[in-house]
Image (cartoon, rainbow, N blue to C red):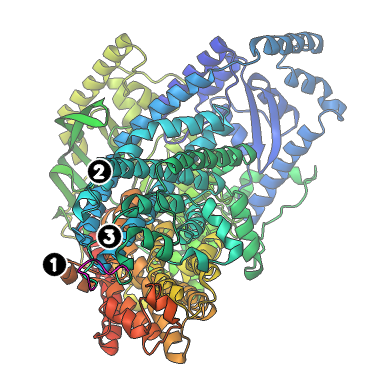
Amino acid sequence: MLKFIGLDAFSSFEVMKTLTKLARSSQKTIIISIHQPRSEIFKLLAESDGQMVLLSRGDVVYSGAVRSVLPWIESTGVGACPSGVNPFDYLLDLSMVDFASEAIEKATAVRRDLLVQAWAGRKRNPKFATLTSWADNGGESSALQENVYSSFVTLAVDIIPTGSGPSLLSQIRVLTSRGWRNQVRDSIVLWGCVGECIVIGLAIGCIFYQLDDSLASIRSRTSLVYTVGAVQAYLMLMILVYRLSQEIVVYDRERMDRWYGPLPHLVSSVLFSAIPNIVYPILFSSIVYYMSGLRTDSLSHFGWWLIVNVAMQLVTFAFAVCCSSVVRGFSSASLFANAIFAFFGLSTGFFIVTSSIPVWLRWIKYLAYTNLCFSILASNELTDRVFDCPFVGPNGARDELLCAPYNGNNVLLNQLDLKTNYFPGPIVHLVYYFVGFLFLAWVALTVHIVNPTSMGSGPTLMDIFINQAVKMFSRKKQIVVRQTESASSSDASLDLEKAKLEETRLDFFSKGLDKRDPVTIRVEALSLSVAVSTSDWSFRGFLRALKKEVSEKQLLREVDVVFPAGELTAILGGSGAGKTSLLNALLHRTPANIKMKGAIYYNDTKNPSLRTTNAVTSYVRQDDNFLLSHLTVRETLQYAAELQMDASIAKADKFAKVEDIIDLLGLRECADVIIGSSAVKGCSGGQRRRVSIGIQLVTEPSCLFLDEPTSGLDALTAKAVVLTLKQIAASGRTVICTIHQPRADIWHVFDNVVLLVTGGHAAYSGRADRVVEYFEEAGHIAPAFTNVPDFILDTASVNLRSAQLEESTRKVVNALVDRFDDNKKEMLALQLPSHPLGELPKVNPQYAGFSKAFPILTRRSFVNTFRQKGLYFNRVFQPIIVAIIMAIFFAPLGNGPSDVTSRFGLLQQTTPIVFSGMLNNVAMYPFERDIAYREISDGGYSATSFFFSFLVNELPLEVFGSLGVTVFMLVITKLKTTVLTFFTFWVVMFGFINTGESVGLAFSTFATHAGFNITIMSAVVSVFSFMTGFMSLNLPQWLAYINHISLFKYGVVVLTQNEFKDKVFDCSPEQIAVGACPYQTGEDVLRLFKFDDKNWNLYMGLFVAVVIAYRLLAWLVLVAKVKSHRW
């Protein structure tokens, strides 16, 4: 199915000719949806036996041959299509309801219902029986049609043989090639992952640098092995889940189109990701191995180290594929992956001794590939390893009793509860995990096929569960849809034209639009260019040879035009002619990489600043992807009115104006429908377009700019929009819009037209009613009954269908450009007023200060977020689910020797809570950020207002999330629980989650590539989590200095002192004798980690200060970004 939006009239007609030819030659069924087709397309479809379906509000008005539609419509009694009128425009006008007034709405609704009922009852009504049969058969007799139909069915069966289409191997080959190119060309993520492996490898190598044979270093070796076997796997898992969550959108769409199935998708994903998945662990593990000083008594140990790390990366990739297949969307998929991986990580026996894990959970270690990797790597490092012991017996030999903790086998058996010599045989078991996860992914993709309307982002089984889980906490607002009266034959006689004369859409503006000081915009010799680099890609293995050639592309070339005040000017031109670039230049919003020459005058003010232009302009952009998807149409416009209209205007008056705009733009039917998006059912594309226009109509600027305001709109609404713009211009405003396919009956509404052609040249700028005469003088005669803008675009476009056509049409275009260059001085002088224009008056922009914008933005964001039940659930319960898993493994903690390890293992496991805040931010902030960028660039409010509104909406979720973490990780696990320790734990967990959000804010503001941000953020947070004191007991001094900016340094000390101060463990003399109870009191533990001399009050204060500092840093990054960029 194809949809034409954004194409100019010439291009759309050329595409239609190509599709018609394709349908004839290949016997393919081609279906398109189209809003404003030109008249030549009707003729083309009629002559090629095309079919059409005419829909109105979900009902069928006509379905049959194109050449039969006009006789059918005439037979219903609504009238014949007038000569010289585009038949498609006529049909669309008949089938739509116009909400300009109650009288017009009633008349058009009656007419529309009459047509619907006539088609529905065509078989029963003798009046229509003969004509209906003829229309259904495309003008052929019933007998002939039956023979044709029978022949067609036979032909269809014959031309679709069993097993048609590319083979499985061909599908895998093509998908692998495509995936490889896409993966490598996404250089930000590719090299970001390489950088992550190098940076994390260097960081871990520095933290565990050249470990010696002391007890602290032996403990650090097990920490290092765990870090490599679990932490690095987690970092790569989050990166892969994000990437695969994006890629599966393409798979879902192509799967619904039956291009290929789950098997070729999975096999190709493994193949094109194989090389990076091998290179990443080799880089990381090689750096770590030699920097940390792991065993070098045999090269085979390093070999097994590399093999296990590569296998672990491949299994992590398969696990990420499984998670993104079971759950769609990064927010839900990351939550799912986090929960499962927490089970895997805790089953390794590092943070909690295996014998202390509840019996009913011990089986999980057999499903956890991280447990297998940890066991193999620990065994590889410690088996038969004897460390230097400082204790000597009476005979001068090692004291075996005191030196027991220095024996690697004892460490494996007694402290880690692992086997010795657990390599290399078990490495083969990792292959089972790899195949198993891919098999689960195949089952998930086979069983659940995403609805095509969701564009690959629809609900999955897990999403449905989440929605049901939170359904009780939300109430769905009843959608009010305005109903029309049923049709009757007597009502059809209402004089529609009389009603339109009595009351029109323009009444609102004629009554309420204030006059503005006129602003004439003049452009002199404007040129825009951008540096373009062409790349030649070649690969040998993983290496990339990149050759760049930088050239300059001209977007606009010596453009001279005038936009008079009080008039409506249309900018015409083919796709890529520079229409949007010209608008951005006029608004002072060209990107920093675009070079600009020439001058732009607002009256006599040359090249005004962005603040000055914002004071007198409003801008309706071409895309509608920056509307909050879960607000209704009415709410969207009301929030815009509250933000943009003067504070002195009463709220009721603001909302009354919103209701007028709703009627003006024909949005009454969908006023209480949510905006929606590609993944959420809501308004149609045309309705969202009208909402975007309505937002800018709330204010009354001196200049209104619109980029493709009629793109995606039906003919009636497009006409209404242009008439509205005309009336706005009549109030003294300068209205400028780009337009692709204006219909004939709105062309006369435009006062002026600017024609841009290929290469960014101007070919005409002047009165719209003189353009035909101008082209006739140049030797181009417009055919009778041809839409004028279609004729202009056809004449001034380069046809690329063949070399000969390109050469001939390019000559015509160049001649038009030369002719305008010769005459533009006189033509532009006619558009300028005779009196001096003067400087722009000093007008303050409609800027909402903090006190006004903050509560409105806060309320708007809350409503939009709360209605996204799954997202809201994830934001609250992501950290809580992790805490529940911790409680399942650790609760209840005892007081024996093994519980010492479990205690500081549990405290170390508080640090990953930061990732919950970070992932929550990545799932939500980027979209709200992009909307804020647009509105801040328009001068609506400040970055500070947006920042603190986001903070206020975020804080309650963090409070509840951290409270849940505290209950499960402190109370239920039986850590020391007093009033002080409870509230301290709560504050620390809140700080962890809040800092995760702060890190996400800072990185997501600094760079917009989410995959890159996740990679870098994960690396930074992980490095600081290694330096808490639990993982490495011998931190180099220079890293200790860096550690002062880490909140982990302060939070972990506070929690550890709370837990271990004045603590005494139950150790028997036998356990002390064999070294099974090395820590008999809490003070022993504090001395081990060097926390015994830390001031609790100081560290608590520093923790709060660091949390606040990170949020202030995120605010400064946002303010700096807004000041240095334009959108």
User: Can you identify the residue that label 2 sits on?
Assistant: 298
Q: Which quadrant does the N terminus fall into?
A: top right
- Density class for disc 2 (Cα within 10 Å; few <14, some 14-19, many ≥20) is few
Earlier-in-chain disc, 1 versus 3: 3
Provide residue 413's location: percent of width, then percent of height.
42, 61
The residue depicted at 36 percent of the width and 59 percent of the height is 929
Residue 1038, which numbered label? 1
Query: Could you tell me which secondary element the residue under label 2 belongs to?
Result: loop
Q: Which span of residues is magenta-colored?
A: 394-400
Q: Magenta region's main secondary structure?
A: loop
Q: Is residue 556 magenta?
A: no
Earlier-in-chain disc, 2 versus 1: 2
Earlier-in-chain disc, 2 versus 3: 2
Residue 42 seen anywhere in this rendered image of the structure? yes
Q: Amino acid at mark 2?
A: Ser
Query: Could you tell me which secondary element the residue under label 3 belongs to?
Result: helix
The residue depicted at 55 percent of the width and 56 percent of the height is 364
Query: Of circles 2 and 1, which is in front?
Result: 2
Q: Amino acid at mark 1?
A: Trp
Do labels 2 and 1 touch, CB within 8 Å? no
Q: Nearer the viewer, residue 227 or 728?
A: 227
Query: Could you tell me which secondary element the residue under label 1 belongs to?
Result: helix
Query: Of circles 1 and 3, which is in front?
Result: 1
User: Can you identify the residue that label 3 sits on?
Assistant: 1020
Question: CA–CA distance between discs 1 and 3?
Answer: 17 Å
The residue depicted at 58 percent of the width and 28 percent of the height is 258
Residue 807 higher or lower than 191, as above or below: above
Question: CA–CA distance between discs 2 and 1?
Answer: 32 Å
Answer with the quarter of the image where residue 915 lies: bottom left
Provide residue 1021's location: percent of width, then percent of height.
31, 62
Q: Amino acid at mark 3?
A: Val
Do labels 1 and 3 touch, CB within 8 Å? no
